Amino acid sequence: IPYYTGIYQHPLFGKLTVFYKSSMSILQFSLGTMGQGRLQFLGKDQATVEITGAMSYRNPMNLNPMKVLFRQQDSTTKKFNEFVFDNVDSKVQAVFKRVPTK
């Protein structure tokens, strides 16, 4: 779990935070004040997103879940350095870069 959790940044979309919700035993994310979702893993480095919260109206029954990729795993810390919305657009991926911790 620590390989995924943290703060990621995108120049247009802003800050995305991946965190572990222990009461539900699931990884979740928040994007700004309105974007929230749960991550359901398909493998070590990819997951689908179940949109929750205020943005759930965009896909009310999660009929077409978005795919997320975790990329650029650090060889020392094993943390992934990129969080990628893979199917935002057929030609463009929204790549969020991990914000280094101090």
Image: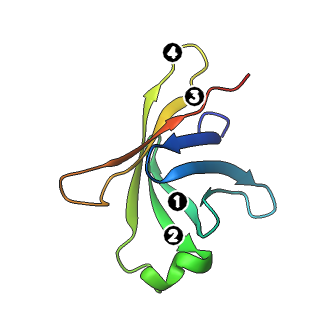
Amino acid, disc 1: Gln
Badge number at residue 79:
3
Q: Is mark 2 on a helix, strand or loop?
A: strand
Q: Residues within 10 Å of mark 3 (few under 14, many from 20)?
A: some
Q: Do the residues labelled 1 and 2 touch (CB within 8 Å)?
A: yes
Q: Are marks 1 and 3 in contact (CB under 8 Å)?
A: no
Q: In this view, does 87 lie to the left or right of 46?
A: left
Distance, label 2 to label 3, CA atoms, is 23 Å
Residue 57, given in percent of the width and then of the height, sits at 49, 85
Residue 45 visible in the picture: yes
Q: Is mark 3 on a helix, strand or loop?
A: loop
Residue 59 visible in the picture: no
Residue located at (32% from left, 60% from top): 88
Q: Residues within 10 Å of mark 1 (few under 14, many from 20)?
A: some
Badge number at residue 75:
4
Residue 73, given in percent of the width and then of the height, sits at 47, 26
Q: Do the residues labelled 4 and 2 touch (CB within 8 Å)?
A: no
Q: In this view, does 65 lie to the left or right of 20?
A: left
Badge number at residue 40:
1
Dividing the picture into quadrants, the one containing residue 63 is bottom left
Residue 61, given in percent of the width and then of the height, sits at 46, 85
Amino acid, disc 2: Glu
- Badge 1 or badge 2: first in the primary sequence: 1
